[in-house]
Image (tube, rainbow, N blue to C red):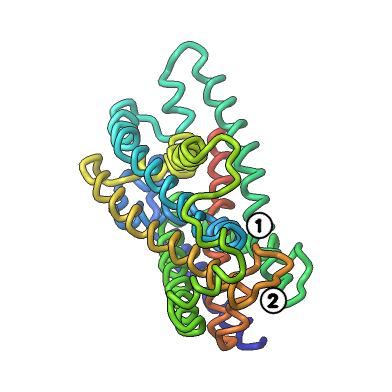
Amino acid sequence: MALTLISFLFFLLLFTIVGTYAATQKQDSTSDYLLAGRNVNPWAIALSALSTGQSGFLFTGQVGYAYTQGLSAIWLAIGWAIGDYLAWTFVFKQLRQVSEASDSETVPAFLAQKQPGYRWISVISALITIFFLGAYAAAQLLAGSKALNSLFGWDYAWGIIIGAIIVVVYCFSGGIRASIWTDSVQTIVMIGALLLLFTVTIFAGDGVGNIFTNLRQIDANLVALFPSDLAWGFLPFFIGWLVAGFGAVGQPHILVRAMALDSADNMNKARNIRTICGFITAFTAIFIGFAARTILPNLSDPELALLDLSQELLPGILVGVMLAGLFAAVLFLLPILKYCLVLLL
């Protein structure tokens, strides 16, 4: 357990160092603070958007969904990816172009566009953002706190405290650049952690074929490609996940990253990087859910399947890596709340 804690704290320190260094690169301008001078490369934008889009749901909800639903959970990843791809293709490039042409540095400012009553449009947009992202942030902190409670028995408040300290250290001074740079490193840790556990579970389950054979023995519905209990049929079910992915156009923490891209001409490149990395993280998380159902079939809380499986299969130091990966998915939203407060100024 000590090695798990040391490994976890090492990665939290790494995130903090990256964010703090990014803060030293800031320029004394509002544009730099809010949009990093619209000069962020597509790799950083893509990795940051992936982290902000998948969040703690990837390590808890998506794994838990696959644990309970089986193979049909893949439609979540497929529908979401298509919707997200459409958003980046048809909305984000124009957003980048128009926001620069209109000199809009925030999403509410972009919506207002100096129309009559634009100040009220900006204020109301910011308040709506704070309200809904505040609830979303609470869910992310709960995911992190639940993980700490499961591994170390810590009170849930510690997850909130740790996340707040890290963000205060780097983000209040570094603006969006610190958030994007840290998100990028966090995404790399997320991908590495998932691929690590994905590989280990294949060996532990004696191969992919054997894992699916065991799933079928537990419940034949777990290897069914389509859910069997859909009241309205498959199409509305799939459209629901597609629309969830397209919902990126209503998420200011993702929109602002598109606005910070160095050129609208690089939007398709950023989209493709984000899509490929998103498929990697989503499908590895889903497969980990499958494997957990066969190796640990009687979990009381499927949302903790990834961490429980990590403790079952990995040495302590690598369990710390998995916990860091989960926290990497959780921490991104706290800077966004700070950003929303700036919108009211």
The residue where tag 1 is placed is: 141
Q: Residue at x 45, y 66 (%)?
A: 284
User: Which residue matches tag 2?
Assistant: 151
* Label ID, residue 316: none
Residue 29 at what x, y percent from top left? 40, 43
Compared with residue 17, is residue 252 higher up or lower down, i.e. above or below? above
Q: Residue at x 50, y 57 (%)?
A: 224
Q: Amino acid at mark 2?
A: Leu
Name which residue type carries label 1.
Leu
- Left or right relative to 280: residue 250: right
Q: Secondary structure at mark 2?
A: helix
Q: Residue 117: horizontal and vertical position, in percent?
A: 52, 13
* Mark before the other along the chain sequence, 1 or 2: 1
Residue at image coords 59%, 86%: 316
Residue 199 spot, x, y in % from top left? 43, 79
Q: Residue furthest left?
A: 265
Report the front residue among 254 and 81.
81
Label 2 neighbourhood size at 10 Å, few (<14), some (14-19), many (20+)? Answer: some
Q: Position of residue 282 (x, y in %)?
A: 45, 59
Return the residue nearer the eye: 283 or 31: 283
Nearer mark to the viewer, of 1 and 2: 2
